[in-house]
Image: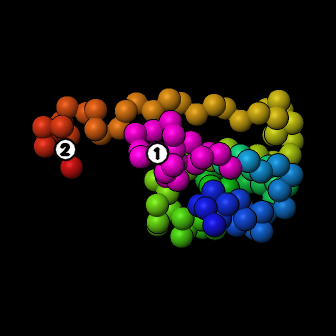
Amino acid sequence: MSTQQAIEQKLTSAFDSQHLMVENESHKHNVPPNSETHFKVTLVSPEFEGQGKVKRHQAIYKILADEMAGGVHALALHVYSPQEWESSGQAAPDSPNCMGGSKNDPAFASGGGQ
């Protein structure tokens, strides 16, 4: 099972989701081809009613602890209650473009970065 499939399966099992989209955005970053390191999650659930963003994110990170401890480097979370999702126009924001990572940072290229 791919990392993306594992994330989808765990979130589907954990939340009563009205909308779930897990996107592998690794190809937008400075990683080897076919990597599964950077993901964008859009999740709409009535369970998020009355919860702040921190609580929502904590709930997702708890469920995806194994993936975060493993190969997942970044997780962009866009979590909404149904009302918030409706107000958003039913669209999560686009992820920003990668800035190139440490391989393009002169401090790292000269051995000065950690």
Return the residue at label 1: 33
Q: Is residue 109 magenta?
A: no
Q: Quadrant of residue 98?
A: top left
Q: Position of residue 75 (x, y in %)?
A: 55, 50
Q: Residue at x 71, y 59 (%)?
A: 8
Is residue 79 in view?
no
Q: Position of residue 26 (x, y in %)?
A: 51, 44
Label placed on residue 113: 2
Q: Which residues are magenta?
A: 22-40
* Disc 2 residue crowd, few under 14, some 14–19, many 20+, Cα 10 Å: few
Q: Is residue 25 magenta?
A: yes
Q: Residue at x 50, y 36 (%)?
A: 28
**Mark 2 is on which residue type?**
Gly
Q: Secondary structure at mark 2?
A: loop
**Mark 1 is on which residue type?**
Pro
Q: Quadrant of residue 6?
A: bottom right
47 horizontally vs 92: left or right: right
